[in-house]
Amino acid sequence: MKTHNYIESVGETFVIIISISIAMLLIVTAAMIYFVIRYSRKRNPNPAYIEGNNFLEALWTVIPTALVMVMFYYGWTGFKIMREVPPNAMTIKVTARKWVWFYEYENGRPGYTLKVPVGKPIKLLLKSLDVIHSYYIPAFYIKEDAVPGRENYLWFQADKLGVYDVMCAEYCGLQHSRMLSKIEVVSQEEFDKFYASPIPPELLGEQLVKGKGGCLSCHSIDGSPLVGPSFKGVFGRKSIVVTDGKEREVTVNEDYIKRSMIDPNSDVVMGFPPNVMVSQKGILTDSEIQIIIEYLKGIK
Ligand code: CUA
């Protein structure tokens, strides 16, 4: 009866609740049909006066209470497994923002897909930088909201190798449906190798641009203009900008990019509205800004 596996526990609870529901449906429907026929007006022209039946009243109080308690018992034991993280769990931070999930391992390694070792409990700490998102792993039967201003958690343990989908299960705006991620479950050896390997610099840049910086919500990397100009081929490009109400031509260089991140309204590219972008001051550090600049140089 007692299971310690979350997935099994959810499956068991589901089967019990659906069985009780189907049994109730059949019993109530059968009784209803029987009563309609047996006690029709045709058969019983004179109604009987009934004052109540203590035995029946006790019965229809006790049986449903017992059934609800059974459902509660299974729900509660499953819930306890879901909330009690094993002490040997590996903790990974998950941050949500419109419209991406990004991860940070205990050793600072970033990523926007998750790689985890098989058979190891994983605790995810969920945060959101903007609106409410919901981290949902259908294959693991688990879902938890990422709420701005607070930290939620969930945990799971994958016992089979494979790649599993992650979705956002809380409508969070235009590209909600594209807020996907993957969990890759690999062997412990493969994970150890990955975990100790150096972090590729492009990954750091992409991570910042997609994740912490949030740049890609408004700037594309494929040349299409979104809310802001595209990053494609941005470095070295000549742009007409509006500075203090006057148009001038600038060449996009390191200084220009830095200024645009810290003081976005100083030189606004022609054709784009001012006062849209929020300053990255206090969000990105100087070295992170430098990583982003290097990343932007590579987008041709
Ligand atoms: Cu994030 Cu929906």
Image: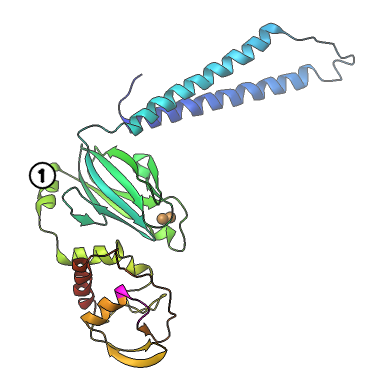
Secondary structure at numbered mark 1? helix
- Secondary structure character of the magenta stretch overall: loop
Outermost residue on the right side: it is: 46
Q: What x and y, as percent, mark residue 255?
A: 23, 81
Q: What is the quadrant of residue 269 in the picture? A: bottom left
> Who is closer to the viewer here, 35 or 197?
197
Q: What x and y, as percent, mark residue 155?
A: 30, 39
Residue type at mark 1: give it.
Answer: Glu
Q: For the C terminus, which image quadrant?
A: bottom left
Res. 289 visible in picture = yes
Q: Residue beneath label 1, please?
A: 189
**What residue is at 70 percent from the left and 23 percent from the top?**
32
Magenta span of residues: 261-266
Q: For the N terminus, which image quadrant?
A: top left
Q: What x and y, as percent, mark residue 152?
A: 36, 43
Looking at the image, residue 10 lies above or below residue 124: above
Q: Is mark 1 within 8 Å of ligand 1?
A: no
Res. 180 visible in picture = no
- Magenta stretch encompasses residue 157: no
**What residue is at 40 percent from the left and 27 percent from the top?**
12
**What residue is at 21 percent from the left and 74 percent from the top?**
293
